[in-house]
Image (cartoon, grey):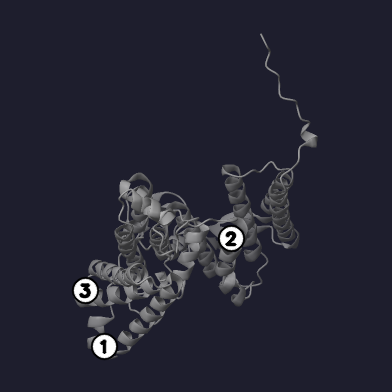
Amino acid sequence: MSTATKAPQVDPALQVRDPAETQRRIKMGGTLLLVAALIFYFWWSIDDELVYYLLTGERTRDTEPGELATHPVTLVCGVLVLAASAAAFLGLIRRGAVTLISMLIVGIAFLLCFVIWAYADLDVAFKPWITNPLPGTFAIATPLVLGALAGCLCERAGVINVAIEGQFLAGAFFASVVASLTYSAGAGLLGGIVAGVGISAMLALFSIRYLVNQVVLGVVLVVFAQGLTNFLLDQIPNEPKIKAYLNEPPKLDDIAIPGLSELPFIGEAMFNQTILVYLMYASVVIVTLIMFETRWGLRVRSVGEHPKAADTVGIKVRRIRWQAILFAGVFAGLGGAYYTVGSTGSFDKNASSGNGFIALAAVIMGRWHPLWATFAALFFGFMSSLRDQLTLVNKIPSELLTMTPYLATVIAVAGFVGRVRPPAADGEPYVKS
């Protein structure tokens, strides 16, 4: 009998390393080394031994804050990030869950040290306390998450949705008008949904039926919604009695979920919110399940990846795209309603302030997956909430704080997400041969 020959053993030292893997190690290790250097700068430059924090409840005269030791915390975080940098250079941090967890730990460590540095050594009579940024995070991120879900639905079906900003504006205006007329914030949400679906119908009509360039079409729809809402707003007289019926809607009330709202740190942030925030939670679950656990979701993904193959097995490509775009309009309209009945009340010009484009960036940052896009939107919401808090300490220029959320989003999309691949037929109109 012939014996099987063993494969020759190769010395690991002689194995050729993948140049891309080597470049990834250097890039990640260098980035973490820079983060560690910044943390050690924070540790070296802080003079105060203590900073004060309050993570639950509201600050009152009798509230006793917690105390946080500045030097031990920053030193431990610096050593931790330095160790992560060494591990990255050695290739111990590989792709997948290990990289995700490592980057999450490094990010939390850096943000903690940055906030400690910002609140330390303040020469003011009224010493501010570090407060919990999560309540503001979920409030700011609610429309971004809903807009990102709308973007995921459209682009998974093969249609680029640059018009999220326009859907936000239309949803915000009509939610305000309907809620004012009916004096019902719930009816305002329905008005926002109808407006969002209306813009979606225009997107579907011109992109699917008339094969208009989808990027150009999205920009045109944003300008159209902006001009339409501004025009209609100017038609509302300033007379208080008339304005009360058209642009002074009631706002949604906060609803505390018994038990959950009393959890430390996250209870008030997540479970003492308006019904719109709870609808956002449900929307993430619904879209994820529909997209990946239903036959219709499989068809949506198939027409976004290979519409010709889907057509050959009997799937109506145009019909599925129409359905996905209109369904996406529901979530974008709800996101727009946040800017009126969900927060400020009355509608102002450019109420969404360009956040529709941030929602589109969250889609890319989340790799066109509804769950990861949600985390990307929460990241932007967290940065915006942190910016609002740091404006009180006057240690960082306000202009820099204003650009921080956008800069963080650009860095995350360009540097840490890596090369992303959209659906293969995204933006490609389908003409049946």
Q: Residues within 10 Å of mark 2 (few under 14, many from 20)?
A: some
Residue 141 visible in the shown view: yes
Q: Is residue 259 left or right of residue 122?
A: left
Between discs 1 and 3, the one toward the N terminus: 3
Relative image position of residue 399 (x, y in whole percent): 60, 77
- Work out how far the residue at label 1 is from the one at label 3, CA to CA, in angstroms: 15 Å
Circle on res. 240:
1
User: Which one is nearer the viewer's eye here, 93 or 116?
Assistant: 93
User: Which one is nearer the viewer's eye here, 194 or 425?
Assistant: 425
Residue under the point 45% across and 50% down: 264
Relative image position of residue 408 (x, y in whole percent): 58, 64
Q: Quadrant of the C terminus?
A: bottom left
Between discs 1 and 2, the one toward the N terminus: 1
Circle on res. 183:
3
Q: Is residue 119 left or right of residue 289?
A: right
Q: How crowded is mark 3: few (under 14 residues within 10 Å), some or many (20 or more)?
A: some
User: Which label lies toward us, 1 or 2?
Assistant: 2
SS class, disc 2: helix
Circle on res. 412:
2
